[in-house]
Amino acid sequence: MAKAHVQHKLLDMMKRRIPTVIAIVLLLAVWEAWVRIEHVPSTMIASPSEIAQATVETWPTLWPATQVTLLEGTVGFLLAVACGILIGILLYCSRIANAALFPLLSAAQTMPLISIAPLFLIWFGFEISGKIVIVAVFGLFPIAVQTIRGLEAVPQFYSDVALTCGATRAWTLWHVKLRVAARQIYGGIRVSAAYIFATAATAEYLGARKGLGIWLQAAYNSFRTPLIFSATLVIIAITGVLMCLVNLSERVLLGPVGEDEDPDAGQ
């Protein structure tokens, strides 16, 4: 019975993924054919085969650059998750803090990276620590916002039941409200994860010693378009891995989405 259920879920997953795979294959085929038939110069746009060849040939230098960006993005992301959730809880619990800090938090997200990167270069130099801070600052906003929205959306009866049973308000917040709001918080974490490594690479491009941003800068300066695509694909790939890990952690910590549904909701 359990084996049949697993097989059914795998079949459903494959059916959902087949259209995506077909679309990607068709896109790559059309792209390759267009570049070859029209004889488009590789300095303008590279074909998928040229990008794959360039990636393989330059992997010994591309991978060390990827490791730097991976480190900056991962550490910055973890800091963003921790700080974002804590800031969200603080702004939810304190109206004064919300009124004082939320506008500043929102304003910080409206500033383009290129306008504040020079400050981080002055403060941190070309070291990795500066890129980690930039990633954390730009990544915590959606997490903080979704934490606030998730806590505000928790029905009041959850707190009433816990308090009636003798729980303190602090215990209710950490063990009841946050658990109910966790799905929405994970929504903010996913939004943050989607652009973490792109932010790290952009920060490197504006000033660093190593990383995919420096790789992109060197490829651009030498007009090696295939290498630009190679770095871009690596950023997409590691972002996809991070998104999968976020989804996996949600499933492990909270269980399948269907388990949160109220069995009496349809009655």
Image: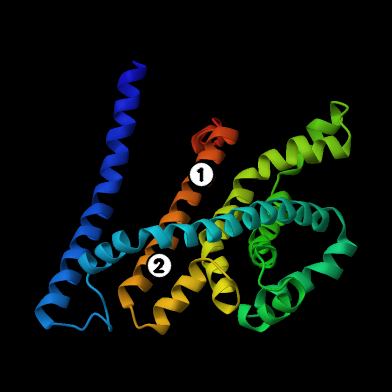
Work out whether 252 lies above or below 199.
above
Q: Nearer the viewer, mark 2 or mark 1?
A: 2
Real-space CA distance between mark 2 and mark 1, rounded to the nearest whole angstrom: 20 Å
| Foreground pick, 67 / 111 | 67
Q: Residue at 65% across / 58% down in the picture?
A: 76
Residue occupying image coordinates x 13% and y 72%:
33
Is residue 74 depicted above or below 198 in this figure?
Answer: above
Viewer-side residue, 262 vs 202: 202
Give the amino acid type for the residue marked by disc 2 in the picture. Answer: Thr
Q: Which residue is mark 1?
A: 245
Q: Is residue 247 left or right of residue 169?
A: left
User: Which corner quadrant holds the N terminus?
Assistant: top left
Across and down, in percent, residue 65 comes to 49, 62
Give the x, y percent position of residue 93. 84, 53
Name the element at disc 1.
helix
Residue 155, quarter of the rendered image: top right
Whichever of labels 2 and 1 marks the residue nearer the N terminus, that label is 2
Could you tell me residue 164's position as x and y percent? 85, 29
Number of the label disc, if any, that sits on residue 265: none
Residue type beneath disc 1:
Leu
The residue most toward the left is 37
Work out whether residue 153 or residue 109 is closer to the camera in this orientation and state it.
109
Query: Which dot marks residue 232?
Result: 2
Q: Residues within 10 Å of mark 1 (few under 14, many from 20)?
A: few
Q: Answer left or right for 38 relative to 139.
A: left
Most foreground residue, 145 or 224: 224
Residue at 54 percent of width and 76 percent of height: 205
